[in-house]
Image (tube, rainbow, N blue to C red):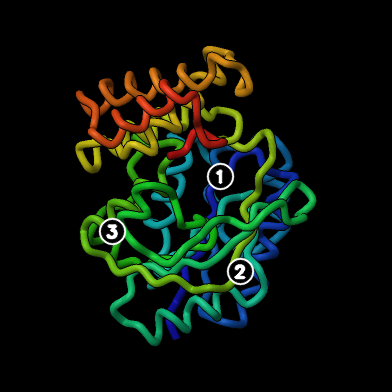
Amino acid sequence: MLSVSAITPSYNQGRFIGRTIESVLSQQGACDLEYVVMDGGSTDETVSILDSYGGRLRYRSERDKGQPDAVNKGIAATSGEVIAWLNSDDVYYPGTLQAVLEVFASRPDVDVVYGDGDHIDVDDAVIEPYPAEPFRLERLKDRCIICQPAAFFRRRVVERFGALDLRWQYTLDYEFWLRLAKGGAVFAYLPRKLAGSRFYPQTKTSGAKLTVHAEINDMMAATFGRVPDRWLCNYAHALVREKWKLAEKGRAFTPAVALASLGASVRWNRGVSGALARTTLSWLTRGLIRPGGAL
């Protein structure tokens, strides 16, 4: 039986972390499980909740350099062959680890197993399915098709490709999947609901979309040398809506997104691809853009 190290980075998530912990510990019968919570020095009820579990888990509460640093410390403090990374407001669904380990056991070549997930609200109700898809690197470049809490990887990939990059506070998981895939890691998609990813106004990414999109573009440029046109346009959409304060139904919105997309391409790619030039020209001449700013 493969051993599993479950790692939860945490900071001031006392209202959710109990549900996260229970969802992990409920998997114990399916595997040899060690569970570590790396807390960033929470000042809410988190530490008292962690204390209440006694020897059922290990934890450390101290200041860190953010979420990727906490995950990396958890990886270094554990020894399981398979790493399960679950944030302190997310949950596993029943039977998740058993299903994942069956794939790993039957496919020794597979480095990463990921499945379907849901966006869930503060009460655990499903908001919408996460748009996971079977793996293709080119598709992963265009959108993150991997739901982080529903993804699991062998320790050997960390030894081969390195741990999380501390530069990326919003795209830490996305960059990690892309780096692994670029290096030749083998991904397997499991078409089964494995986890719930918490989505509410206070989540790190939901309140900073422009910052998130800028980091995605920085990360893509650092990883591949250029940013896909789709991400440039998504950044432009966020810029026009959030910073320029233009309404999506206004006449100026579409040409503004077109111009912002061209500016973003010059900023990150030092030029404009033929496809983006044609697309933005059509927006300027016909005043058309699909909802959400995507190509």
Q: Look at 38% across and 64% down and name the residue there.
A: 135
Of the numbered discs 1 and 2, the one sitting upstream in the chain is 1
Image coords of residue 168 (percent x, y) = 38, 37
Q: Look at 51% across and 60% down and name the residue there.
A: 132
Q: Look at 56% across and 65% down and name the residue there.
A: 116
Image coords of residue 30 (percent x, y) = 58, 82
List the residue tagged with mark 1.
39
Q: CA distance from mark 3 to mark 1?
A: 29 Å
Q: Look at 35% across and 83% down and name the residue there.
A: 107
Q: Tell me whether the residue at label 1 lies in contact with that at label 2, contact meaning CB atoms closer than 8 angstroms.
A: no
Residue 32, above or below 182: below
Q: CA distance from mark 2 to mark 3?
A: 23 Å
Residue 18, above or below 278: below
List the residue tagged with mark 3.
181
Q: Residue type at mark 1?
A: Asp
Give the label, 3 or 1, closer to the camera: 3
List the residue tagged with mark 2.
193
Q: Residue type at mark 2?
A: Lys
Mark 3, Cα crowd under 10 Å, few <14 / some 14-19 / many 20+, is some
Give the label on residue 69, or none: none
Q: CA distance from mark 1 to mark 2?
A: 27 Å
- 237 on left or right of 271: right
